[in-house]
Structures are given as C-alpha cells and as structure tokens.
C-alpha cells in the first residue's frame, strides 16, 4: 500500500511539474524576411499588430497580426483604395515612408509620411484589418517618421524634422519635434517643441535622428529614435525625462543597438540595424522589432531592409536591446507557446509554394503606384490570370502591367507558366526580377525576324531602353512556355522550358550586384514579378499566366 501511495504521489508530482513547465519556442530572424523595412508594432490584449514601409508599391502599408511574435499573417493593407492616394509619377523609393501603429480606447491609428504629396498624415480604423480612413494630413508637423504617444487623456504626435530655424550645422542635422494632438478632430494643439536637436550629442555631429517613439515606464518618459542613417552606421538611441515635454537626457551608454562596430567580414552578418519599436512579449518581458539587412558580401544585399526581433533588458531603468550578445542573433529562445496561422502563404523561414491564379491575388502581391483592375482578369480564362499588354513599361513612373512579390531569401527562385503569342517585336511578356526603374532583369517571350524567341534584357541606369543580353529561338509556334529566375546571393540564372520542370538554361550566373541597394540606391528590395508590355504602342494582345511559384532556402533558417 505504501509503494502504491508513493507511486501515485510521484505521478501527481510529475503531472504538476509538466503542467507548470514553461513552453519553449525559437524566434528565428528575420521575422519578416525580404523588403519589409521600418517596422512598428503595438499590442492589444494578446494580439500583436505590425506595419512596415512600402514606398510606391500598392497596396501600401501592410498590416500584420501575430499572437507569438514569430508567426505573422498579413490581414490587410492600410492604403488599399486609390481614393486614399496613389503614387503615379513617383520614383520607386518615394511614396510612403515609415508608418507607425498605435491603439487607444477602441481605435487603431497609423501615422505615416507621403513624402511627395501632403507629408505626415493619420488614418484610423476600428479593426486593424480595415477599412482604414482616408488620410488626414497634419500640415504643421513638417518632416518624416511620425508616431503617436497617448498619456491619459492627452495625445501627442512626434516626428523627425528640420534643424532649428532650418539652419543645418552639418549635413544630416535633424531634430525630433512634437505637438499635442486633439483626438476629436486630429488637429494639433498649441506650439511645436523641439525635443532632440541633432541627436544624443550634437558636438559629435550625429546624423538623421529619426523614427522617434515615446514610452512611459516607472514614472519616466523614454524617447527612442534611430541615429546614423539607415545603412552600415545605423543605430538606436534612448533618452528619458520626468516630463513628456522634456528635457530628455540621453543614456550614457548609447547606442542601445548597433552593429556598426563589428567586423563586416564576419560569418552571416546582420547589419544596418535600427529604426526600432518596443513591445511587451507574452512573457511580460520587453522585445524590440527593428530593421536590418543580410549582406552576402560587404554591404551588398538584394533582399532589402528586413524586420528582425531581439530581447530587451531594463538595466538601471534603461532599455538595452540584445544585451547578452554583440551580434544580433538568428535565433532567440523564448518561453511561450507557438501559435501558427492557418490558410496562408508562408512569410518566414525556408519555404516553397505554388500559387494558382484562380480567382484573386494573395495579399503578398504588389502593383506599381496604383491599382487598376482594368488590365487584368481572372474571369476571362478559367483558372488563369489574363494580363493585357500595356504601353507602359517598368522603366517609367506609371502603372505598367506588373504584379510582383518580394524576394525573401538570398537563395531563391520564382517561376510561372505562361501562354502568349505575338508577331510583333515590341510585344513582350514574361517574368522580371525588379529593384527599380533602371535596375532589373527581364526574361520574356517575344518575336524577332519572323521567329518566336526567349529574351533576357537588363535595365540600364543611363538609358530609357533595356539592353538585350541573350536571345534563343523557340521551336515552332509554341504558345505555352515555362519561365524561371533563380538567385544564389549575387548571381542570378534564367531558365525556360516547353514542359514543366524540363528547364533549359538561357543565361547562367548573371551579375546580381546590379540589383543590390549599394548599386541601385534607394530604400527597397528586389521583387520577382510577372510583366507584360507593348512598349509604348497600343495593342489588344494579352498574356495568360497559370500560376506563380516561389522557393527560398537560406542556411541561416535551417
């Protein structure tokens, strides 16, 4: 009887210990790989919502949802109607800069900058999935990177702005400024005040103090901002005050996050980190989301600025990001349960998918500058996307017949099945790996000298025309063709086939550095896309796409 009692006691104890054991999960960086820069985050109950920049891509400002900070699902886009805005006539890296998301008393707020049209604005929604309101522009808040701070019944808007009296002491001299905000009409109240001039130490000529956020904790107001510019010198700094209006005193051990002091030749570097936002995790501890990049050599990267996460420790009442490591890690262990989303295309980790064009596009697909449903259709051909050839080209600043999806891995590929026939050399349809109006590669089917051909073009930084790199004749009057573009860090290869998975190489290991941010400049990353054009001439011709496939496999995700 005693042995039975001991055995039962052991079982009870074991069940108790197991039921109270802390769950373990691995956060893998980047949590949003590919061109998802300038993250901002808010928590509402057990739910997390995050937004990132989109520049001139449409729809703009994706809104993501998660319950575990690891698995994210895009639940909508804040700018999804042309009545809100469009970006016609603007270069790729203009448009929407650095959104921030907040929640207060039943309402969600997104602040952002439409850099060439109206400046800083606010949109609101009752649900983070939308619909979001038309923008209300805050004309008095001149600058970029606005965010909101709520303190009791009061609200404030802060932002990056001009130096005092608009007189720069050095290149990159900026300020952080703030207004009180009337939430009933979203108008500023009272006078503007400069909270930070230049940066944490103006004697050292700090540049680009931007992306400010204010948090309240333990009686202090904390002002966090990026400093150093969104490249290899990027960093995050922190200041605090006893009053929301300041004065703000900088932390003596700033910056609280940077990788600029590390060896650029280190293995699998994560660099250019900054532009952070703080949030409390499911375990009650603080975490930071921020942008960073994964260069494959030096400062060369094609995947754009991505979203990363790291733990935060409060040391002497100061937040320090990634305090236990010199390098931002690809993995962090956390103590809560994983909660995956159902029925969505994957967003992180290594993955592959084949998206059939049946009746709609997934939220991960993007247009250039605006949305015009007149040039594509899911109804004209069953289980296919029919695309009209437009005179507009991707070299211009309009809305060409382009639909793209981000390259999210250094080692990746995209493919499609296309049916297209033409007797004109100006009519082309195919796939593109696109960074901006001048930096892209275009794999297409066309017609030259009485023959059907597969062609590879390269964008030109000094010309309004593409450069033909390679051409190969297609047999007979073949209408259907398979196309594939693959990347291996700085090398891209281009393939075609007359049957699925029977690939013929058109061009091998083409220079991919041409698509890198270092070469192409700007703030975006590369997109794989489908693209059809008649190059300035009107036509009734169309191309039919059956599906879009993507595969990504990076060693850091294994």
Image (spheres, rainbow, N blue to C red):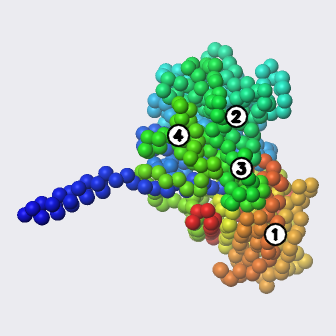
Tell me, yes or no, whether the two marked residues, 3 and 4, touch with CB atoms within 8 Å: no
CA–CA distance in space, label 4 to label 2: 23 Å
Along the polypeptide, which appears first: circle 4 or circle 2? 2
Q: Is residue 75 left or right of residue 266?
A: left
Q: In this figure, which residue is indicated by the disc labeled 3?
A: 262
Report crowding for label 1: few under 14, some 14 to 19, many 20 or more residues within 10 A (C-alpha). Answer: some
Q: Percent from the top left, x then y, of residue 232?
A: 75, 47
* Of the pair 558 and 358, the residue shown nearer to us: 558
Which tag is nearer the camera, tag 2 or tag 3? 3
- Compared with 354, 107 (above or below) is above
Tell me, yes or no, whether the two marked residues, 1 and 3, touch with CB atoms within 8 Å: no
- Residue most extreme to the bottom: 476
Which residue is located at x 59 percent, y 53 percent? 329
CA–CA distance in space, label 2 to label 3: 23 Å
Q: Quadrant of residue 532?
A: bottom right
Q: Is residue 242 left or right of residue 266?
A: left
- Residue most extreme to the left: 1
Q: In this figure, which residue is indicated by the disc labeled 1?
A: 510
Q: Which mark is residue 210?
A: 2
Q: Percent from the top left, x then y, of residue 193?
A: 68, 19
Q: Quadrant of residue 138?
A: top right
Query: In terms of secondary structure, where does tag 3 sit?
Result: loop
CA–CA distance in space, label 1 to label 3: 30 Å
């Amino acid at each position: 009887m005693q042995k039975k009692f001991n055995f039962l006691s052991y079982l009870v104890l074991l069940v108790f210990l197991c039921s109270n054991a802390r769950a373990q999960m691995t956060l893998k960086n980047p949590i949003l790989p590919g061109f998802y820069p300038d993250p901002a985050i808010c928590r509402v109950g057990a739910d997390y919502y995050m937004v990132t920049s989109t520049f001139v891509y449409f729809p703009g400002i994706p809104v993501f949802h998660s319950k575990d900070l690891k698995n994210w699902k895009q639940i909508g886009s804040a700018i999804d109607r042309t009545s809100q805005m469009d970006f016609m006539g603007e270069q790729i890296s203009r448009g929407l800069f650095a959104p921030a998301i907040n929640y207060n008393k039943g309402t969600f707020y997104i602040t952002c900058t439409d850099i060439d049209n109206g400046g800083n604005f606010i949109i609101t929604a009752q649900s983070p999935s939308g619909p979001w309101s038309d923008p209300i522009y805050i004309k008095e808040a001149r600058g970029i990177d606005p965010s909101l701070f709520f303190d009791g019944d009061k609200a404030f808007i802060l932002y990056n702005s001009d130096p005092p009296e608009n007189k720069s002491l050095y290149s990159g001299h900026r300020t952080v400024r703030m207004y009180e905000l009337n939430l009933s009409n979203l108008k500023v109240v009272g006078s503007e005040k400069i909270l930070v001039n230049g940066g944490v130490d103006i004697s050292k000529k700090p540049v680009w103090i931007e992306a400010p956020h204010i948090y309240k904790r333990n009686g202090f107001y904390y002002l966090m901002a990026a400093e150093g510019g969104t490249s290899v010198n990027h960093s995050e700094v922190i200041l605090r005050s006893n009053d929301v209006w300041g004065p703000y005193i900088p932390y003596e051990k700033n910056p609280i996050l940077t990788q600029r002091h590390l060896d650029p030749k280190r293995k699998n570097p994560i660099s250019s980190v900054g532009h952070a936002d703080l949030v409390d995790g499911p375990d009650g501890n603080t975490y930071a989301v921020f942008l960073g990049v994964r260069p494959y050599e030096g400062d060369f990267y094609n995947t754009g600025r991505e979203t990363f996460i790291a733990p935060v420790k409060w040391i002497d009442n100061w937040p320090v990001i990634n305090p236990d490591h010199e390098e931002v890690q690809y993995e962090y262990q956390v103590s809560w349960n994983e909660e995956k989303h159902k029925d969505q295309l994957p967003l992180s980790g290594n993955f592959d998918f084949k998206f059939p064009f049946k009746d709609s596009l997934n939220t991960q697909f993007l247009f250039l500058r605006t949305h015009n449903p007149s040039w594509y259709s899911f109804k004209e051909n069953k289980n296919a996307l029919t695309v009209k050839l437009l005179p507009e080209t991707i070299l211009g600043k309009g809305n060409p017949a382009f639909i793209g999806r981000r390259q999210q891995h250094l080692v990746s590929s995209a493919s499609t099945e296309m049916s297209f026939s033409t007797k004109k050399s100006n009519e082309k349809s195919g796939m593109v790996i696109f960074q901006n109006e001048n930096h892209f590669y275009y794999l297409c089917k066309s017609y030259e000298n009485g023959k059907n051909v597969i062609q590879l073009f390269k964008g030109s930084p000094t010309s309004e025309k593409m450069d033909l790199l390679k051409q190969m004749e297609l047999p007979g009057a073949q209408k259907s063709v398979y196309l594939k573009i693959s990347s291996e860090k700085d090398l891209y290869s281009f393939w075609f086939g007359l049957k699925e998975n029977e690939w013929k190489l058109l061009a091998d290991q083409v220079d991919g550095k041409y698509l890198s941010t270092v070469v192409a400049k700007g703030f975006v990353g590369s997109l794989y896309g489908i693209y059809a054009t008649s190059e300035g001439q009107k036509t009734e011709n169309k191309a039919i796409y059956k599906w879009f496939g993507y595969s990504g496999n990076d060693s850091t995700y294994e």
